[in-house]
Image (tube, coloured by chain):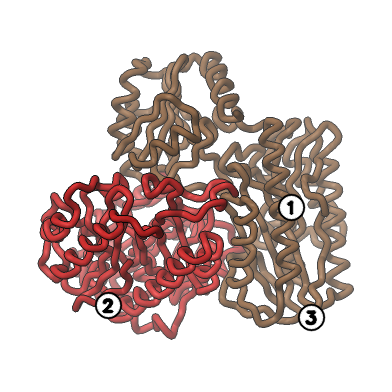
Chain colours: A red, B brown
């Protein structure tokens, strides 16, 4: 369940992600802009989904939305929605120096467009979660081309520093899952948040893994969960786990299926191949409704990145990608997070 | 249950307005300041895009992801729960069963959907339905006894959270560590959500989300502590000094306490939100800070609380919404002072004929944390 406020630790950490990292990312994006002839790029992100915005700026909108205005040459600007009193705190989350107020968009956007020359060619990215009113605000001033198909693939191949962020995220995940198994939900959440998780989310089962639910009432804490889904975010980067906390035959079967998937997981392997490897271990078991035919997906600045890997898909694992692999059957889960060269960040 | 009462009220309003179908949509991205239309009418907090389709004699709840339908059935008590993969497709199929005439359909919450889903849902209900947001807000604007009880419970959880802050804070802690402790403590007491803004500085410019800053002696910790219980939010606004408070800090905080007292009196049923805001601004202005009664030195003097109806909206001089008995909102004359920085002082209140009743057991003081 998405929280009303992501309140965990978040900052621009210049030790992990220094300025040169963002300069390189911006150069890559500008290369795509040049290839398409775009004079300016508007990147949208909001508290629900901000992968591309965060990739370029490190900025994460805790509330509402933000637009990044990126000219082909020159400095980037951010327009942050929210109260003006919050702008100084927002400026601490990004390397971008010009952090302005979205409330001035009707003034700033035409000025910015005019600065790009006569009849500039504009593109808009980060459209997946954009709200109608924000989209209308943009198209009132220009007629942008949609840029997600051109830009989102850049996020699939993890850069060296991104891989390190994923490792850190998975470390917090590992601690969190271990604490969940030993001391329960509240202790696990405390561990994650005190470990500098930016966000942490749980679904858990009180019915032997049949259904997974969010925390709703104190009665949810009376009995230890039998299974759980845990997602942890660190400095923008997600890791996730499906775990069964009781020893059951289904858990063993899921673990064996996962091991078989990990044995074949390498660049070029399809979701169909992974499912085929898992299948012999899952005979007689019913797929869990939460996972169905899926066997995994990409992960990084979004919890659910492309590609979706499933038994009926030819999407492949790619060199440089990071993936969450999962097996879910009635009464048993197993999952792993993997990176290139078979580096396993989490397995359980 | 309160959601059932709200659904009946909505039916009555639909009859009055000549509507045949009301489509209430949730994005599942819950907002502290906005209503979640599906939660308002069902008591179910969704994890994915969902909708309730309300006809004159019947209602259906559409749930994504489909595997969450059983929880939806249990929480809502609805007999017609439709598991769906894509909201737009399901809305189209279910809406067809209601056979509502064009022009007799209203929708609430749709504008919060992502663009692609918004377009699908709009197309599924025949283009441009009437705007039902106001109707939905009014249905839930007056709290039932159960909701007021939930608001009191949420407030008590917030106060226990603040007590925890006073107990565990020590110089050397990171802000995020303190926030983690408070958040988890309140969750263990039953907070199903929490809009917890908590930060500290020697001179605060505003309250913000917790950072890696290390707490020091002389910091003022600001906390907008906002747990939800049964989906009903509350909020207390508190300020605490690590170490002894200065005379100047106490003097400025006293202005806010007086503003709060005036605001509560001005916020009687029949007055407007603007009346309450003007009352608070008057006290702060008389103390010499009239120029600071505007952004960025403050935001608003309070606001409604999300998930359920966000009425009466912002407590602001431009808001002429009439306050009605049993509305619940947070009143907070939070204010930046050029000499001591930003201070928080606020309580959740219930509107009565005589003024606003604070739901908190102990109203805000500028507290000191011994070091």
Instruction: State the separation of the CA atoms marked 3 and 2.
Output: 45 Å
Q: Quadrant of the C terminus of chain A?
A: bottom left
Q: Which mark is residue A159?
A: 2
Query: Chain letter of disc 3?
Result: B
Query: Chain letter of disc 1?
Result: B
Can marks 3 and 1 be said to lie on one chain?
yes
Element carrying mark 3: loop
Element carrying mark 2: loop
Residue ID for mark 3: B371
Element carrying mark 1: loop
Q: Position of residue B215 (x, y in %)?
A: 67, 78
Q: Residue at x 73, y 41 (%)?
A: B274
Residue A58 in view of the camera: no
Q: Residue at x 44, y 32 (%)?
A: B73
Q: Are marks 2 and 1 in contact (CB under 8 Å)?
A: no
Q: Position of residue A252 (x, y in %)?
A: 27, 60
Residue ID for mark 1: B332
Q: Position of residue B161 (x, y in %)?
A: 69, 59
Instruction: State the separation of the CA atoms marked 2 and 1.
Output: 46 Å
Q: Which mark is residue B295?
A: none
Q: Nearer the viewer, mark 3 or mark 1?
A: 3
Q: Residue at x 64, y 61 (%)?
A: B185
């Amino acid at each position: 369940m998405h929280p009303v406020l992501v309140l965990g630790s978040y900052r621009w950490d210049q030790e992990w992600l220094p300025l040169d990292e963002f300069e390189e990312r911006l150069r890559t994006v500008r290369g795509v802009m040049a290839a398409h002839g775009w004079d300016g790029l508007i990147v949208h992100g909001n508290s629900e989904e901000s992968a591309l915005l965060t990739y370029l700026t490190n900025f994460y909108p805790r509330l509402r939305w933000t637009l990044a205005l990126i000219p082909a040459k020159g400095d980037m600007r951010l327009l942050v929605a929210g109260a003006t009193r919050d702008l100084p705190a927002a400026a601490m989350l990004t390397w971008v120096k010009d952090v302005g107020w979205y409330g001035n968009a009707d003034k700033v956007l035409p000025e910015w467009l005019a600065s790009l020359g006569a009849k500039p060619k504009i593109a808009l990215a980060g459209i997946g979660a954009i709200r109608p009113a924000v989209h209308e605000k943009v198209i009132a001033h220009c007629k942008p081309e949609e840029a997600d198909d051109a830009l989102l693939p850049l996020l699939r191949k993890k850069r060296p520093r991104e891989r390190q962020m994923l490792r850190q995220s998975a470390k917090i995940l590992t601690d969190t899952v271990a604490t969940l198994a030993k001391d329960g939900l509240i202790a696990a959440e405390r561990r994650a948040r005190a470990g500098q998780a930016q966000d942490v989310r749980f679904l858990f089962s009180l019915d032997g893994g049949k259904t997974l639910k969010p925390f709703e009432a104190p009665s949810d804490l009376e009995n230890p969960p039998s299974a759980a889904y845990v997602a942890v975010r660190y400095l923008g980067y997600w890791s996730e786990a499906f775990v069964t906390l009781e020893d059951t035959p289904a858990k063993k079967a899921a673990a064996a299926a996962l091991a078989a998937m990990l044995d074949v997981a390498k660049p070029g392997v399809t979701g169909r191949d992974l499912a085929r490897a898992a299948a012999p271990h899952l005979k007689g078991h019913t797929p869990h409704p939460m996972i169905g035919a899926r066997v995994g997906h990409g992960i990084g600045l979004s919890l659910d990145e492309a590609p979706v890997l499933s038994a009926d898909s030819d999407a492949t694992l790619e060199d440089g990608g990071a993936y969450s692999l999962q097996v879910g059957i009635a009464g048993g889960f197993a999952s792993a997070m993997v990176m290139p060269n078979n580096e396993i960040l989490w397995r359980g | 249950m309160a959601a059932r009462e709200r659904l009946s009220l909505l039916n009555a309003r639909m009859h009055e307005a000549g509507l045949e179908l009301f489509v209430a949509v949730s994005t599942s991205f819950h907002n502290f300041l906005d209503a979640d239309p599906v939660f308002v009418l069902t008591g179910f907090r969704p994890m994915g895009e969902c909708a309730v389709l309300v006809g004159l004699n019947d209602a259906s709840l559409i749930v994504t992801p489909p595997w969450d339908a059983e929880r939806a059935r249990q929480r809502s008590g609805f007999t017609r729960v439709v598991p769906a993969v894509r909201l737009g497709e399901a809305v189209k199929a279910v809406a067809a069963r209601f056979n509502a005439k064009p022009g007799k359909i209203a929708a609430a919450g749709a504008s919060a959907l992502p663009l692609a889903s918004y377009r699908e849902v709009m197309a599924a209900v025949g283009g441009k339905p009437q705007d039902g947001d106001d109707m939905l807000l009014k249905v839930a604007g007056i709290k039932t006894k159960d909701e007021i009880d939930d608001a009191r419970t949420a407030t008590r959880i917030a106060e226990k959270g603040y007590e925890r802050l006073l107990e565990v804070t020590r110089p050397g802690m990171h802000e995020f560590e303190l926030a983690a402790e408070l958040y988890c403590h309140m969750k263990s007491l039953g907070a199903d959500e929490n809009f917890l803004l908590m930060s500290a500085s020697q001179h605060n410019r505003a309250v913000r989300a917790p950072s890696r800053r290390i707490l020091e002696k002389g910091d003022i910790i600001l906390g907008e502590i906002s747990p939800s219980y049964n989906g009903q939010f509350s909020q207390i606004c508190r300020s605490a000094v690590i170490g002894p408070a200065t005379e100047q800090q106490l003097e400025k905080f006293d202005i806010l306490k007086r503003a709060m007292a005036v605001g509560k009196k001005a916020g009687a049923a029949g007055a407007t939100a603007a009346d309450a805001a003007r009352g608070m601004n008057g006290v702060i202005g008389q103390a010499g800070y009239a120029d600071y009664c505007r952004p960025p030195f403050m935001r608003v003097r309070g606001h409604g609380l999300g998930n359920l109806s966000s009425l009466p909206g912002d407590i602001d001089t431009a808001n002429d919404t009439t306050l009605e008995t049993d509305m619940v909102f947070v009143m907070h004359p939070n204010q930046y002072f050029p000499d001591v920085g930003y201070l928080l002082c606020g309580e959740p209140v219930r509107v009565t004929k005589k003024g606003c009743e604070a739901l908190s057991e102990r109203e805000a003081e500028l507290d000191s944390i011994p070091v």
